[in-house]
Amino acid sequence: MNLNGRTVVIGVSGGIAAYKTAYLVSRLHKAGAEVHVIMTKNACEFIAPLTFETLSGRECVTDTFARKGHYEVEHVELAKKADLIMIAPATANVLAKLACGIADDMLTTTVLAASCPKIVVPAMNTGMYENPVTQDNLEKLRGYGFEVVEPASGYLACGDIGAGKMPEPEVLYAYVEKAVARPKDMIGKRVLVSAGATREAMDPVRFITNHSSGKMGFAIAKEYMLRGADVTIVKAAVTAEPPMFCNIVEAVSASALFDEITSRAPEMDVVVMAAAVSDYTPAEYKEEKVKKKDGDLSIPLVRTRDILAYLGEHHREGQFLCGFSMETENLLENSRSKLERKHVDMIVANNLKDEGAGFGTDTNLVTLITANTDEAHTLMSKADVAKLIADRIQELQN
């Protein structure tokens, strides 16, 4: 995800988890963000400012009275330009000061002066974290608009086992992405995305499926989540990792997928059917494993219910319905026929034989088909395809 043009201030307070923050700063810098690190005096005992300067490419700020030029006080300048402030790790002491509005160092003065979104990442001993005073301070911060990242549980530096462990850098990066990667132009909208490959069981051991990894559906769900939408993913079998901050519903078979999607679709503003749904399922499920015998085996199959067609028939006014069409020949003809037969607003079509457009890849080569247009696009990442789809749907809805 590209974070070019975003300014992120990372506050580091005095905890052993500060070493993880170095990985976060590196990740943000590589994504194109302008990263500024502010360290408390105690944080400097755990990790050297030079580490963050090397990883961010900018001076690490530790002095409350540092100045830019003659007039710009550093903490005010950073507060004005920041798109986001994240404090990781946030000790019990720093949380208490922020909750009470105490500004006695560079970090707390910058946070108090800033109007941008703020995220705190508590990291401390379990007893300190669970102490009612700390919990009260966290609740106060939530009331002031701070987002609180819940700590992980596990073995802590002090030797205790419990809550208080700082989440891994990739988790914190996801929180930053959610906050600043996209304008929040979908707040209040409800989006349903299906993803993955259905599995049609013939016995407790075997099933019929396809090669879908879920990557495309997850990329679309993430794009809408980043824009502020309330996203529900109805997920069949996948090999990709689902995005954070989405509602996940499990549905392995085509029948289960039908039930989960059709029960939720009427409340949705946008429905994107990216799952690869099996067209056929075994006519009979055997309770015991089908044993191997001499000769061939024939498995009678019956048609599954067509989810996209059902959604098209029950399409409510104002709702946008988007389907996918994976073809191996006659891409435009077959996909346009699908658009018309199933009464959908847009079909995202691709050809399995095109290099980079198959199952499990990180790229896709798509044509967006509506009632009046065919838009062929060049090969791009699935994240970029997801942005393209969301942009086009928003244009067509407005």
Image: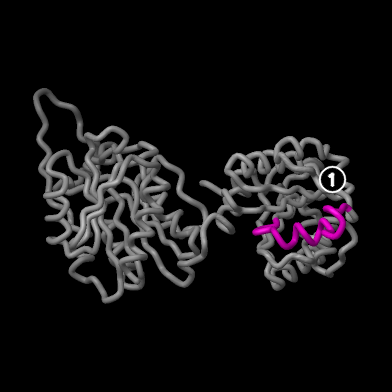
Asked if residue 67 is among those painted magenta in the image, a careful observer would answer yes
Residue in the picture at 84% in, 47% down? 14
> Quick one: quadrant of the C terminus?
bottom left
Query: Does 373 sit left or right of 27 as displayed?
Result: left
- Is 219 magenta? The answer is no
Q: Residues within 10 Å of mark 1 (few under 14, many from 20)?
A: many
- Residue 381 found in image quarter: top left
Left or right: residue 233 compared with residue 139: left
The residue depicted at 13 percent of the width and 40 percent of the height is 329
- Answer left or right for 296 relative to 237: left
Furthest toward the front, the residue is 70
Residue 203 image point, x, y percent: 24, 41
Q: Residue furthest top?
A: 294
Name above or below for residue 221 compared with residue 310: above
Q: Quadrant of residue 291?
A: top left
Q: Nearer the viewer, residue 168 or 132?
A: 168
Q: Secondary structure at mark 1?
A: helix
Residue 218, percent from left and from top? 41, 50
Boundaries of the magenta span: 66-85
Location of residue 165 in the rendering, given as x and y in whole percent from the top left corner: 71, 47
Q: x%, y% of residue 345?
A: 24, 64
Q: Quadrant of residue 24?
A: top right
What amino acid does circle 1 point to?
Ala
User: Quick one: 155 or 32, which is closer to the camera?
Assistant: 32
Left or right? Give the position of 394 relative to 52. Answer: left
Residue 342 shows up from this direction = yes
Residue 357 versus residue 217 in the image, above or below = above
Q: Which residue is mark 1?
A: 43
